[in-house]
Amino acid sequence: MAAPSGPRPGWSRRAQYGLFFSFIAAIVSLAIGLVLLAFSIAAPGSFRDMKGLALDATAPITQSLHAVSATVEGLASGAGNYWDAARQNGELRRQRDFMREQLIAARAIREENGQLKAALQLREETPDSVAAGRLVGSSFQSPRRFAILSAGTRDGVRIGMPIRSSSGLIGRVIDAGGLASRILLISDRASIVPARLLRTGQAVIAQGRGDGSIDVKPLEVGRNPFRPGDLIITSGTGGLYPPLVPVARVSRLDGDNAIALPLAAPGAVSFAIAQQPYEPEAMAPLTAKDQDLP
Amino acid sequence: MARSALASKRKIGRGPIAGAALVPAASVVVAILLSALPIVAETGWFPDFGFLILIAWRLLRGDVWPSWWAAPLGLVNDLIAGFPVGLSVSVWTASMLALDLLDRRTIWRDYWIEWALASLLILVEETAQWQVSAWMAAPVPFSFMFPPLLISIAAFPVAAWLVGRLDHWRLGRQ
């Protein structure tokens, strides 16, 4: 096939000018696009209102479709649970008896802990949860790891709030619309969580790798402190994430670091909770710089 | 004779549907809206649907839209799919301009050349995404981009087929 003759309008002067002006307009819009991109990179907070509006525009579609897919999934997994029910039942009973013992031990420890804290006159505020929502979407087309939470500024969600689920830390809010907000997941490359190793209490840093896993680095140089299966929890350093929230489980060692998998897999969590930043005062000098990051 | 003349109006009297000139841009917007689907993925391996449909239209016809229309369409993609504002605006407009310039040079065009051109544009687009996220404090190794790159290139023929069907429908051909 010979190439199409392309946009050659023949002898018409009017058509020729039209084509020329659309060419100029394309070059101008390319320049505008590059300027917008430069703004997005240099000052990521710049288009907050526009992004919030776009989140609101797609929120009804995403949330209603999510309801449909959740129902279908629920039917499928509900039917699956009846299969092999007797064996599952026995196993759950065994687990329950084991957990009961653990629970009693934990209760005793908590009481002792409370007494010790009272003796030390240590005051610890647990941050209030602001809103609960579901993770209804994600950036499945881009190398960044974002998720969409079905709660927005109308529910009290603000930019910078940490997001967690019952099983662990999920991330923090970077764009907020009225009905939905965008979350920077802890598996994104730009997300850094100050954390510690539960087994030894050693301070570590958990940085996302961009493929759903997390790179955990010890702060002190020395022997690799990790073992496969180790739990990583937040340390509360920095004032954004509350302490003692489970983050990830180490899956394998990698040189001085370890590769871990998030405990709250974004695809599997049913509810996500937005909380107040742990120590807003401690964060105040940081926020301006920190919120420019993503 | 009279009966057949009355019965069949298939061949004659069928023109483009109303608003045929807007169908291509509308289909790109619909493709962009696919990124609002409730998929929670750990990896970003899905193709950029809007971009695939955009280049499929442009490779099918040189005059579907004035090239600058790619800029507002790119802005919609940036906002809905959550890319940094300006990324798709620049990349989409630049691809339209590149294809405009290329159309003046090419003397032969067949399906394989179109697929190769599309693959090249997809490579440029994915590289731009990768580079911009590196500039925005999220540098991932380039090997992370291979799966989405291959998936997008493999998905282009599907987009081209879809666009071909839409083109027949909007121009009233069967």
Image (spheres, rainbow, N blue to C red):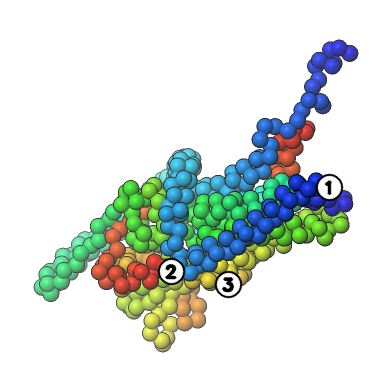
- Quadrant, the C terminus of chain A: bottom left
Q: Return the chain for callout 2.
A: A
Residue A210 x, y percent position in the rendering: 51, 66
Q: Element type at marker 3? A: loop
Q: Does B134 sit above or below residue B72?
A: below
Asked if both marks, 3 and 2, belong to the same chain, the answer given is no
Residue A24 x, y percent position in the rendering: 67, 57
Viewer-side label of 1, 3: 1
Viewer-side label of 3, 2: 2
Q: Is residue A236 left or right of residue B72?
A: left
Q: Element type at marker 2? A: loop
Q: Earlier in the sequence, mark 2 or mark 1?
A: 1
Return the residue found at the far top.
Answer: B2
Q: Element type at marker 1? A: loop
Residue A264 visible in the picture: no
Q: How many marks?
A: 3
Structural distance between the alpha carbons of marks 3 and 2: 19 Å
Of the residues shown, which amino acid type is indicated by label 2?
Leu
Of the residues shown, which amino acid type is indicated by label 3?
Pro
Q: Return the chain for callout 3.
A: B
Numbered label attached to residue A11: 1
Residue that mark 2 sits on: A293
Q: Return the chain for callout 1.
A: A
The crowding category of the residue bearing disc 1, from other C-alpha atoms within 10 Å (few below 14, some 14 to 19, many at least 20), is few
Q: Does A68 sit above or below residue A51?
A: above
Numbered label attached to residue B141: 3
